Amino acid sequence: MRYYTYFPGCSASHGGAKAYDQSARAVAKAVDVELIELDDWNCCGSTPYTSVDELASLCSSGRNLALAEKRGFDMVTPCSACYVILNRTNLCLKEYPELKAKVDEALAAGGLEYRGTVKVRHLLDVFVNDVGYDEIASKVERSLAGLKVASYYGCQIVRPGPGFDHPEYPQSLDRLVESLGAEAVSFPLKARCCGGSLIISEEDLALELIYKLLDNATSNGAECIATVCPLCQTNLDAYQSRVNKKFKTKFNIPVLFFTQLMGLAFGIDDETLGLEKCIIPAEKVLASHLRK
């Protein structure tokens, strides 16, 4: 058994990405990974908050790191934004002593301290580098043979570096998809931005970015998209109808969390994986490929 401190993040635990948390826990158990949820965790600090009040955001993020440090395990999150923010905080506290002193003061007020020993990792990194493709392949009970998947990394987990994959042409998710028996199709925009939270403030701009991603995936024959980010999944799944209206397209491609795809191959039931929470139904696409 491999043990990790688990930081689910707000989207996966309380927001629209609960299916990510459900499926992550289920597939982790299947590959002998113990995700021990961090007690009393709080928001990572979030990207918008960092722009508004950097110090407050770093203190919020630092508190999570201080709590995790007590455990002594690597800190793992399924959320790309949480992964970036927590890593950024780690880096800032190491490189800027004056800033660390202010964060230390805030942590001390809550009876905490942070010595900088926590390693923050994305869940994809743990699965492909600690568990490994061979072990994942050995857990497959239902082959995904013939299913054409666009592996979508988004813009955060592979940059800025150094990360666990190439910043422009990552392959870790593609190889994981292939270990499940599916086909990872060519997807040149696999590490491009989906627009993120700009869908709220700059909808037209975000819809154009989403359109480009959906068009690139479907043009290369993808039957579904597998992603590692809660916000990417929401944007590509929930806003397809708006993209279709704006660009006169007919996209109808399911967008799954990579953990849901793993769970399907492992034989885990749809309810446990939260498949019913997808806005674009995946059942029809999957039914023609899933086989014992």
Image (cartoon, grey):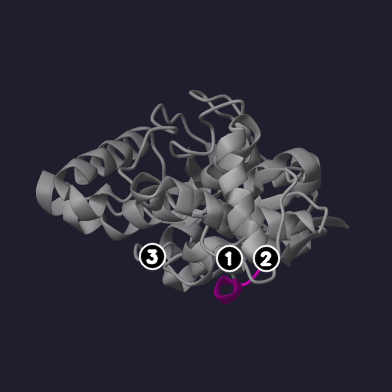
User: Which residue has dot 1 on it?
Assistant: 21
For label 2, the residue is 25
Dividing the picture into quadrants, the one containing residue 195 is top left
Magenta segment, principal secondary structure? helix
Q: Specify the amino acid type for callout 3.
A: Pro
What kind of element bears circle 2?
helix
Which residue is pictured at 58% across the width and 49% down the height? 103
| Residue 187 in the figure: left or right of residue 247 | right
Q: Secondary structure at mark 1?
A: helix
**Which of pointers 3 and 2 lies earlier in the amino acid sequence?**
2
Q: Is residue 157 magenta?
A: no
Q: CA distance from mark 2 to mark 1?
A: 6 Å
Q: Is residue 87 visible?
A: no
**Residue found farthest to the right:** 1
Q: CA distance from mark 3 to mark 1?
A: 19 Å
The x and y percentages for residue 149 are: 49, 43
Q: Residue at x 75, y 48 (%)?
A: 136
Q: Which residue is mark 3?
A: 281
Residue 157 in percent (x, y) is at 53, 38
Name the image quarter holding the C terminus: bottom right
How dense is the environment of label 1, judged by Cα within 10 Å: few (below 14), some, or many (20 and up)? many
Question: Magenta part of the protein: which range?
Answer: 268-272
Quadrant containing the N terminus is bottom right
Q: Secondary structure at mark 3?
A: loop
